Image (cartoon, rainbow, N blue to C red):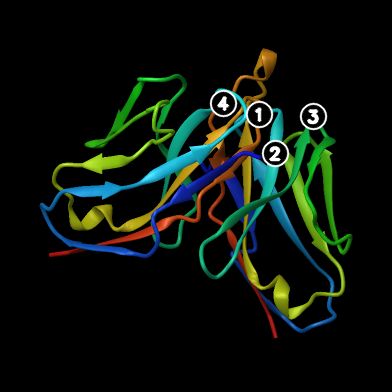
């Protein structure tokens, strides 16, 4: 089946630190890949996406590269801010408007 | 101004009651969804409607019944509420593209349901 796996547990880091959240996927076809962000008390927002291998999605200083050889789509940001504290979800779609989400990672940035 | 809106934002009710959550989108999208997010933040799709027709119905108890009076609205009615129904429910919408290509889903702010 199609699924997304994110690294376990919350991520706590200091302001201006480097952030990486790992995401790997299993899919029977050629999925599009996404990162969604959920700020406290809000719904999910699309952060970035990539639709084919080697594509790099980027937004708000965040980046993720679609790696077909490692079936990964890791999220990175070079210097986080307190305002980046949120829950981050990796997701995949096979083009039928159906998204499969990972379990999400809580990111807490400490001043 | 709000693209996808839900009411109510919070809902506290007793076991056994029947309740409804309403969702409206003003984006002109063809497809609407209901998701359930549990206490561990795990997000799972429940239903999807395209132009008022049900297209996705995951393994959800039949106590949950979605209703789409028009393509801008997708309401969720829940009968005989149980403790395990406590969660945050998100409505979302997207524009249906030809060929089934993915398009961004826009989420509402969520409805936190607490069953006592």
How many marks can you see? Answer: 4
Mark 3 and mark 1 lie on one chain; the one further toward the N terminus is: 1
From the image, tell me which residue sits under label 4: B103
Q: Chain of mark 1?
A: B
From the image, tell me which residue sits under label 2: B32
Dot 4 and dot 1 within a common chain: yes
Mark 3: secondary structure? loop
Q: Nearer the viewer, residue B64 or A76?
A: A76
How far apart marks 4 and 1 lie (CA) works out to 10 Å
Mark 4 and mark 1 lie on one chain; the one further toward the N terminus is: 1
Residue B87 x/y as whole percent: 62, 68
Mark 2 and mark 4 lie on one chain; the one further toward the N terminus is: 2
On screen, residue A59 versus residue A46, left or right, reads left
Query: Looking at the image, is mark 3 or mark 4 nearer the viewer?
Result: 4
Does the CB distance between marks 3 and 1 fall below 8 Å?
Answer: no
How far apart marks 3 and 1 lie (CA) works out to 9 Å
Q: Quadrant of the C terminus of chain A?
A: bottom left
Quadrant hosting residue B95: top right
Q: Nearer the viewer, residue A30 or A15?
A: A30
Q: Looking at the rendered structure, which numbered label has been put on residue B51?
A: 3
On screen, residue B18 versus residue B102, left or right, reads right
From the image, tell me which residue sits under label 1: B29
In this view, A80 is above or below B88: above
């Amino acid at each position: 089946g199609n699924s997304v796996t994110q690294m376990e547990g919350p991520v706590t880091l200091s302001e201006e630190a480097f952030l990486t959240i790992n995401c790997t996927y299993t899919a029977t076809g050629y999925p599009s890949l996404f990162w969604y962000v959920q700020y406290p008390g809000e719904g999910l927002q699309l952060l970035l996406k990539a639709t084919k291998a080697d594509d790099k999605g980027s937004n708000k200083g965040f980046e993720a590269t679609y790696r077909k050889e490692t079936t990964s789509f890791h999220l990175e940001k070079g210097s986080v801010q307190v305002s980046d504290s949120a829950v981050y979800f990796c997701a995949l779609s096979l083009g039928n408007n159906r998204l499969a989400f990972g379990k999400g990672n809580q990111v807490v940035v400490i001043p | 101004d709000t693209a996808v809106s839900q009411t109510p934002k919070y809902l506290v009710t007793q076991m056994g009651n029947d309740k409804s959550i309403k969702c409206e989108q003003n984006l002109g999208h063809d497809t609407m969804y209901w998701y359930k997010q549990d206490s561990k933040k795990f997000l799972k799709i429940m239903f999807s409607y395209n132009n008022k027709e049900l297209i996705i119905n995951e393994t959800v108890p039949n106590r949950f019944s979605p209703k789409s009076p028009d393509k801008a609205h997708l309401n969720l009615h829940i009968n005989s509420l149980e403790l395990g129904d406590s969660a945050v429910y998100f409505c979302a919408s997207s524009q249906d593209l030809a060929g089934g290509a993915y398009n961004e889903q826009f989420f509402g702010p969520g409805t936190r349901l607490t069953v006592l």
